[in-house]
Amino acid sequence: MTDDTTTKFTDAEALDFHSRGKPGKLEIMPTKPMATQRDLSLAYSPGVAVPVKKIAEDPESAYDLTTKGNMVAVISNGTAILGLGNLGALASKPVMEGKSVLFKRFADIDSVDLEIDTEDPEEFINAVKYLGPSFGGINLEDISAPESFYIEQRLKELMDIPVFHDDQHGTAIISAAGLINALDIVGKRIDEVKVAVSGAGSSALSVVGLIKAMGIKHENVILCDRQGTLYEGRTERMDQWRSAHAVPTDKRTLAEVMDGADVAIGLSAGGAFTKEMVKSMAKNPIIFAMANPTPEITPEEVAEVRGDAIMATGRSDYPNQVNNVLGFPYIFRGALDVRARTINEEMKIACAKALAELAREDVPDEVALAYGKRLQFGPGYIIPTPFDPRLLSKIPPAVAKAACETGVARRPLDDVAAYEGRLATRLDPSASFLQKIHANVKASETPKRIVFAEGEEEVIIRAAYAFQQQGLGQAILIGRDDLVNREFNRLGLSQTHNIEIWNARHSANGPAYTQYLYNRLQRDGYLERDCRRLVNQDRNVFAACMLALGHADGMVTGITRHYSAALNNVQLALDSRPSERVIGMSVLLARGRTVFMADTTIADLPQPEELADIAIQSAHAVRQMGFTPRVAFVSHSNFGNPNTEGVNRIAAAVRLLDESDQMADFEYEGEMTPRMALDHNRLKALYPFARLTGPANLLICPGLHSGGIASKLMAEIGGATVLGPLLIGLSRPVQILQTGAQSGDIVTMAAIAAYELDRDHRVWAEGSSGADQLRKTSRLLPL
């Protein structure tokens, strides 16, 4: 159930949105290359004959060789379009295209909309039942009741793929999730509550059917339509679906049913619930008023007569929106991934329970920013929001598991954790990269102690809490105890954390840190009292001293100070590794590939030996993160054409590596443009002498400006997810955040600090480093 009443636009804007560029909202893009005659031969004749024969021998192989396993048909006859009524099949096409877009956006499911121009149920069924070979599932939409019940039931009997009428079941599932949490909050048992329902259409009947399957007693649910209650013996406007929910009762009106009810569910019309009805309900009533655009009663009206009610509506401008997009994409995702034959009640209940559990977890920053407020589980937040990025990795596994347990899955779900990981990578290009980091950190026998230097900031507190809750290590907050604890209380986290809080001004370690810092800085003009003031008042310096003296393993900072200022503070207490440089490396994740870029933070205009050092250190870091480094020194030209001072500088760095090739155990090449570096086929075609055996995954930039600009452009307009820059070269792991970083970004950088990005350089033999060797030879190489 969705609502757009809070999004203001004109009719002209809506028409322009759908008509500009390519008309409509969908297009078909090939997933295989189609550039050469060979490509076309493989894609069509004669190559296509091979999978044809394979599928004829083994029909299940169609899921592996075609789009069937990730394709859903969105089908309607236009007899009940949104709230507009019966406007015909063609008029429903914009809605069906929109539904297909939602499948792709939220669950990476490909979808085709099909509008069938008939109001005859048998003709509709006959048209759809023959489409089974083409799709992995059928989503029915905007079909009027009671025909919709019959159509879905018959198609489920006739087809061996999931058939799901979202208008019925979507609302039911999301409502059930909210009801689970509301009952938990008010402390009522599901098998004891009494429920009043306004409405007896397809959505209402589906809601009632599902909550009964979850444990609400049949006799405790009374439905009402325009003629009154659905009681046993009633004959007016009754059919087999309504009759199934008729109960023995002498109540005949909605007002009578609402009197003493624990729960009121509205799927009828605006104004159906009155204040008097709400006043008559039991203590701590739960009211789901889901009529659109005007609910049966507004939250404001309820608040006038009840201060103990929990409300949900179908509108986005009120808390607890019952929105179908929380259900259908993820139900189909789970069903498709185990090749389910149907979507049964157990799968719907599993979805509802998973949604309910997700609403109880701490909400990430991107959700808070999208809604302009911090959401916390309670009466005002019992249903997750549609833009919660965790939905894709949380809901489908629950659905898939239920399909396997009830015997409707063709493919077993052997490793739920691995499946969750694969789901997380479908829409978030950084997830696969981060999984490696997180898995390594969690597997550590000794959890790392990570200092969050700006410990009084809300976003830092939330990140530290999430870091520790995810099992990534022990978080330490630097801040004044009273302020930090007050923030924990405000966020509702005071009873659920064991995070250490260190007050720099009152720490017992202050004298030791002061002495350590004074010993380092006394010949740089610092007095002892200067060092004491730095330790007491500068949290970055205090945190860096913690690392230097072994009281912590890593550190994150930077949201309240510029990058260079934070780094300068840290370097007062920490040196770089022997014979190494401090550099920044950004991670670019886009279009299914991971590319590293250095230096994007520190080296302004590096000279050849600096560029070579940057390549060596970055290659080591890339290898530590599980990648085989292929280094390209990028430039505006390819191999000296045109020949400029900047190109000569890069070429000299490559020669330095050539002269010390016993030290550089990675592929490298340059100078070359980014296009050549990333397009290996083009590189080998034009420059067959190039030494790279595949596309480069580590780009060494000729200067800070080019690296910084390129990485930021990729983040803003290139569609890439950019992590970092990651700080490399300090003696202890420190990561400096970008100002304005969200809690998810902060957790990521803390995990990388815990991973100990540059913890030991096994690349080099004992003795002098590769960088030292390069410096020895650099004097012999002219620029």
Image (cartoon, helix red, strand yellow):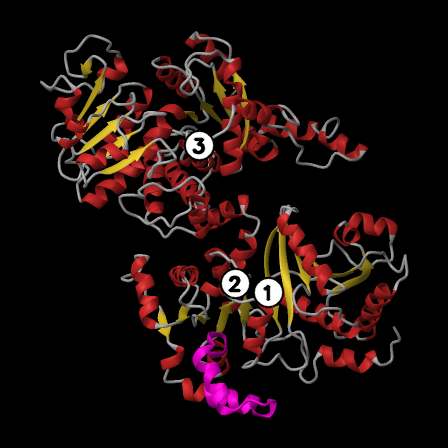
Q: Is disc 3 in contact with disc 2, using a CB cutoff of under 8 Å?
A: no
- Kind of residue at disc 2: Met
The residue nearer to you, when weighing 261 against 624, is 261
> Which residue is identified by label 3?
340
Label 3 sits on a secondary structure element that is loop
The residue nearer to you, when weighing 752 against 151, is 752
- Kind of residue at disc 3: Ala
Residue visible at 13% across and 16% down in the picture: 252
In the picture provided, is 492 more to the left or to the right than 132? left
Residue visible at 32% across and 23% down in the picture: 203
Point out the tag, 1 or 2, that comes first from the N-terminus. Answer: 1
Picture quadrant where residue 177 is located: top left
> Which residue is identified by label 2?
749
Placement of 524 over or under 429, stated as above or below: below
* Inter-mark Cα distance, 3 to 2: 39 Å
Q: Quadrant of the N terminus?
A: top left
